[in-house]
Amino acid sequence: MRAIVVERPGGPEALKLVEVPTPTPGEGELLVRVKAGAINRTDILARKGVGSAYKKATSRLGVEMAGVVETVGANVGGWQAGDKVMGLVSGGYAEYAVIPADRAMPIPDNLSFIEAAAIPEVFLTAYQTLYWIGKLQEGETVLIHAGASGVGTAAIQLAKQVSKATVIVTAGTDEKLSYCKQLGADHAIHYKQVSFDEEVTRLTKGKGANLILDLIGAPYWNKNIQSASMDGRVVLIGTLGGKETGPIDLFELMGKRLQITGTLLTPRSDEYKASLSQELADRILPLFASGAIKPIIDKVFPLEEIHNAHRRMEADENIGKIIFQVGDQE
């Protein structure tokens, strides 16, 4: 089969399409003929070999895919050849990928493979941070940074549809802000034009946000603390702006009784990912089937042009997910 490999860490030009052996599913695994997959920030870090969590991941990239079950191993439950599935994998930039059966999710009949490929990583990340970690309650206020990103567009929809939350987002262009509003965001803040912490204070009448999802990191630390409500929760899920912040006033955290949590989904255990996938399938997939929630597609590239997909993500040009497709979509 053909697959994208990285022989040594580097820029988008380091992505090479080569022939590799087709994997064989073991016990509890499915072999999937990949129809589409998506680009993620974790892929960028892995390609570059940045950070201890990604140094071992540079040879084969791709953490999610959608496709058709080709063959099954033993003890895979009710899955069988021909089933349409999506989910988290290792080495998803390829014509075939193996997925643990308990991590596979059925593709709703109303979604294409390209749409399905836009779901697993960002919706699992958003669901995890909103509910498993952030404990978002109905009617609370959530501040979502990078609102037009894949995780951001997923989190907006989940917070509105599942929790009827008040959603505040930040983004850096009028186009992105407008799109976030179309998805259901109640307030959209242009972080390049105003100080978002002052806007959050104004919009919440001084109460602050109950939950903050932050993909930016260090530059937003102090403003996040100012934006958080009493007993607020801040979940750190990215460091697009940097990972090292200045002095921290611990009394500010204590005074507001804040909970600060950091998380990454990719390095989580197989068991964690399986439980998360199963809960998302049970609770959220019906919302995709009904059209209440939708995957957000930015642009689609053929597998052969995946280097251009990486360039688009690194340039921060996307609204929603950047997808690659493999061959015929029928």
Image: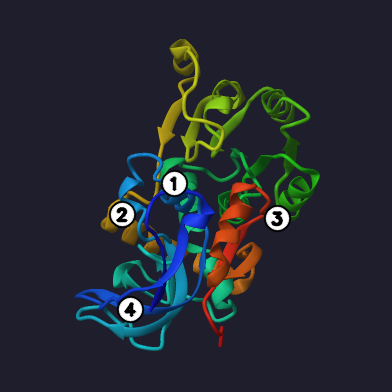
**Which numbered mark, 2 or 4, is in the foreground of this view?**
4
Q: Is residue 127 left or right of residue 319?
A: left
Q: Amino acid at mark 3?
A: Leu
Image location of residue 152, percent across then percent down: 60, 48
Camera-nearest residue between 158 and 265: 265
Q: Is residue 51 above or below residue 155?
A: above
Instruction: Say whether disc 4 or disc 1 marks the residue closer to the N-terminus.
Output: 4
Image quarter where the N terminus lies is: bottom left
Q: Quadrant of residue 206?
A: top right
Residue 105 seen anywhere in this rendered image of the structure: no
Instruction: Say whether disc 3 or disc 1 marks the residue closer to the N-terminus.
Output: 1
Instruction: Estimate the spatial distance between the alpha carbons at disc 2 and disc 3, rounded to whole Å.
Output: 29 Å
Q: Amino acid at mark 1?
A: Lys
Instruction: Say whether disc 1 or disc 2 marks the residue closer to the N-terminus.
Output: 1
Q: Residues within 10 Å of mark 1 (few under 14, many from 20)?
A: many
Q: Amino acid at mark 2?
A: Tyr
SS label for mark 3: helix
- Residue annotated with mark 1: 48
Camera-nearest residue between 137 and 127: 127
- Residue annotated with mark 4: 31
Instruction: Say whether disc 2 or disc 3 marks the residue closer to the N-terminus.
Output: 3
SS label for mark 2: helix
SS label for mark 4: strand
Instruction: Estimate the spatial distance between the alpha carbons at disc 3 and disc 4, rounded to whole Å.
Output: 35 Å
**Which numbered mark, 3 or 1, is in the foreground of this view?**
1
Q: Is residue 322 left or right of residue 121?
A: right
Instruction: Estimate the spatial distance between the alpha carbons at disc 3 and disc 1, rounded to whole Å.
Output: 33 Å
- Residue annotated with mark 3: 183
